[in-house]
């Protein structure tokens, strides 16, 4: 699969993430805060071009920020439309692909083709191994002990809302990036009626939504706090058995399907 790599040029409007996970920053400099990530295959709109920085908007969730132009590859408008019609989310915690850059290890939630061999624009790829999860909760559990990373969205590092967005994309529910935005989706349900894969939202001392987790069996809560972990959900909030206290105050439970 030897292919010549063509980097982004000033006149191009669209591109896709060519690496396993790349940082999207709030400012056009390496020292700036990572506000989110793009996973392999995620398409973007280029809002402003300079070298080495591109100001971009995610096609999938509308998030804006700055990326290094060397970490994405170009798409024409026609190629973008074709890719949006063809991609699927990888359901394996990790998978290996071979492409124009050589072998790459991807995280679950990456965008790949429906077949073992697939193309993104003019670039050819082949999936070398993928063992998909049997169900959504099993896939969610594959993130256990992933380190917390502000702005992270992958099995290599993730934050609370990134975890929720990644898992729910496999359910064909494309949620916004931040917890407070995710809390505007679905229907409110009571603590007594909560069920598997409902979302629990938590507020801080100022009354703002600052945390989200996925409800599991027997009122377990899967969430990213230090690392992705399972704790107990109570009517007051998250009870962390290691700390022997409530660490997050419950605000609301929502059902998305």
Image: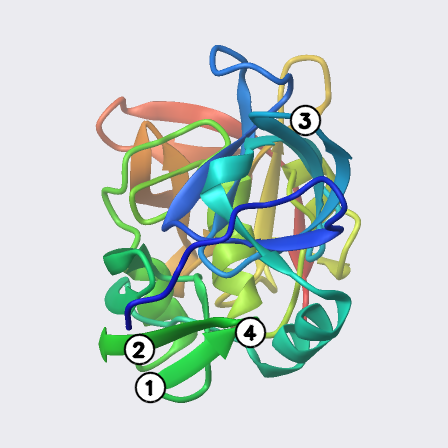
Which type of secondary structure does the marked residue at label 1 adopt? loop
Name which quarter of the figure residue 116 lies in.
bottom left
Q: Which residue is mark 4?
A: 171
Name which quarter of the figure residue 54 lies in.
top right
Which type of secondary structure does the marked residue at label 4 adopt? loop
Q: Residue at x 76, y 56 (%)?
A: 185
Which type of secondary structure does the marked residue at label 2 adopt? strand
Q: Kindly report which numbered mark, 4 or 1, lies closer to the viewer in this rendering.
A: 1
Q: Which residue is mark 2?
A: 126
Question: Marks 4 and 3: CB-CB under 8 Å?
Answer: no
Which type of secondary structure does the marked residue at label 3 adopt? loop
Determine whether 76 is above or below 12 in the image: below
Q: Which mark is residue 50?
A: 3
Determine whether 164 is above or below 68 in the image: below
- Give the Cα separation between the discs numbered 2 and 4: 24 Å
Name the spot of residue 15 as percent of width and height, x first: 62, 54
Near-viewer residue (228 or 38): 38
Q: Residue at x 64, y 21 (%)?
A: 26
- Give the Cα separation between the discs numbered 4 and 3: 37 Å
- Give the Cα separation between the discs numbered 1 and 2: 6 Å
Near-viewer residue (93 or 78): 78
């Amino acid at each position: 699969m030897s292919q010549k790599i063509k980097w982004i040029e000033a006149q191009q409007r669209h591109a896709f993430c060519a690496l396993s996970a790349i940082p999207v920053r709030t400012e056009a400099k390496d020292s700036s805060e990572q506000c989110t990530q793009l996973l392999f295959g995620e398409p973007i709109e280029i809002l402003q071009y300079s070298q080495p920085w591109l100001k971009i908007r995610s096609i999938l969730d509308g998030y804006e920020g700055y990326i290094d132009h060397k970490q994405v590859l170009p798409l024409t408008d026609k190629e973008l439309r074709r890719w949006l019609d063809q991609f699927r989310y990888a359901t394996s915690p990790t998978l290996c692909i071979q492409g124009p850059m050589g072998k790459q290890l991807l995280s679950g939630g990456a965008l790949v083709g429906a077949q073992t061999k697939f193309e993104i624009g003019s670039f050819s790829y082949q999936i070398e191994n993928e063992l998909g999860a049997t169900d959504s909760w099993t896939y969610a559990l594959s993130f256990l002990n992933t380190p917390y990373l502000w702005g992270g969205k992958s099995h290599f590092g993730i934050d609370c809302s990134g975890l929720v967005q990644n898992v729910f994309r496999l359910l064909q529910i494309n949620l916004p990036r931040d917890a407070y935005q995710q809390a505007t989706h679905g229907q409110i349900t009571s603590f007594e009626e909560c069920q598997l894969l409902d979302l629990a939202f938590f507020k801080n001392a100022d009354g703002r939504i600052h945390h989200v987790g996925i409800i599991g069996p027997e009122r377990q809560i899967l969430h990213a706090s230090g690392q992705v972990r399972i704790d107990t959900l109570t009517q007051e909030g998250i009870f962390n058995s290691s700390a022997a206290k409530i660490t997050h105050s419950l605000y609301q439970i929502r059902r998305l399907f």
